Amino acid sequence: MAEIQFSNITKSFGATQVLHSLNLQIERGAFAVILGPSGCGKSTLLRLLAGLERASGGEIEIAGRRVETLEPRQRDVAMVFQNYALYPHMSVAQNLGYSLVVAGVKRAEIDRRVAEVARTLQLEDYLQRKPGQLSGGQRQRVAMGRAIIREPKVFLFDEPLSNLDAKLRTQMRLEIKRLHRKQGVTSLFVTHDQIEAMTLADILIVMNKGRIEQIGKPADIYERPATAFVASFLGSPPMNLIPAVVDDSGCGVVLGGEMRIPLGGAVPAAPGSEIVAGIRPEHVQIGRGANLPVEFVEELGNGRQVHLRIGQTGMAALLPASDKQAVGTTLPVSLPSEHLHFFGSDGRLMELQPKSAAA
């Protein structure tokens, strides 16, 4: 059953439309992550669900109830912000329990819930401290605790880890995932960080320019991106995108004007058509094939990222640390056809057809 549903949602700020007839359904208990670049509309969508902004059009449902006209406090959601949004003059215990005080919950129940949340988030030793006396990770745990204590139907996370250093971000990702497994509350998490998205999401939603590009399991989207944008945005380093031309047979392509690759099927485009070929850096093979110049090399510790050039386009390859390549030399490179993806002029994935289709 869907816990969250957006139907034909639009949102404009003045003359600027930031969400375009967006439809999205998130099942109960899922941990859904919206991934996209700055300005794509992901935080706006979250704020619409929380009631902090009003949609220009469309419907929003939480647990089968229309909420787009309800005030935030009536929606039974809790939100964790990037900047923590803690009260600096209150102790950790007071911050945790504040929403329950406002709701008129009895003191004994408030104390019980504060103690339970503090145990869950390992905040028991900090209950009497003020936010200014805490580390960034501790403040973020307090912000999460303040959301958890309300026992909402939905948790909303608006880039909550952006202000933390790399080590703390890793720790907090694990903490958030552990909490979700324990609580089982439907969660919607917004980020521009693909590592956060890939590690946290049950369901990944990739957005761009106010539209959803693709929805699915993180591994499925990584392995089979539906658009060139998704291919270029998801992955570190991202997928190589190389201009290609369909050859005369229709069952092969020429990349960068110099590398011909036969395919196991027919490209659904006329011979001579310009398309885009994609391949992930880890799938680029070294040792045979066309000789490509090495432009520079990045040492990664556990490997090397070698930047090559094919025609007028740069291409990255991930290689073992034991492989030594010098800038200015050439490397024999091949691109296995089974790892190639093809995108048409509209940016969408092209499925190869049986070879008879090219006849």
Image: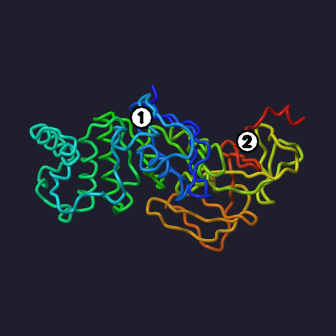
Q: Nearer the viewer, residue 309 or 121?
A: 121
Looking at the picture, which amino acid does disc 1 mark?
Answer: Ala
Quick check: 220 above or below 335? above
Going 46% across and 46% down the picture, which residue do you hit?
Answer: 48
What residue is rendered at 69% in x and 65% in y? 309
Q: Position of residue 283 (x, y in %)?
A: 61, 50
Image-based side of 97 in relation to 188, left or right: left
At label 2, which amino acid type do we have?
Met
Q: SS class of the residue under badge 2?
A: strand
Name the residue at the bottom extreme. 328
First reached walking from the N terminus: tag 1 or tag 2: 1
The tag on residue 350 is 2
Q: Residue at x 79, y 45 (%)?
A: 262
Quadrant for residue 28, please give it.
Answer: top left
In the depicted structure, whether residue 359 falls above or below residue 191: above
Residue at which label 1 appears: 30
- Alpha-carbon distance for marks 1 and 2? 30 Å
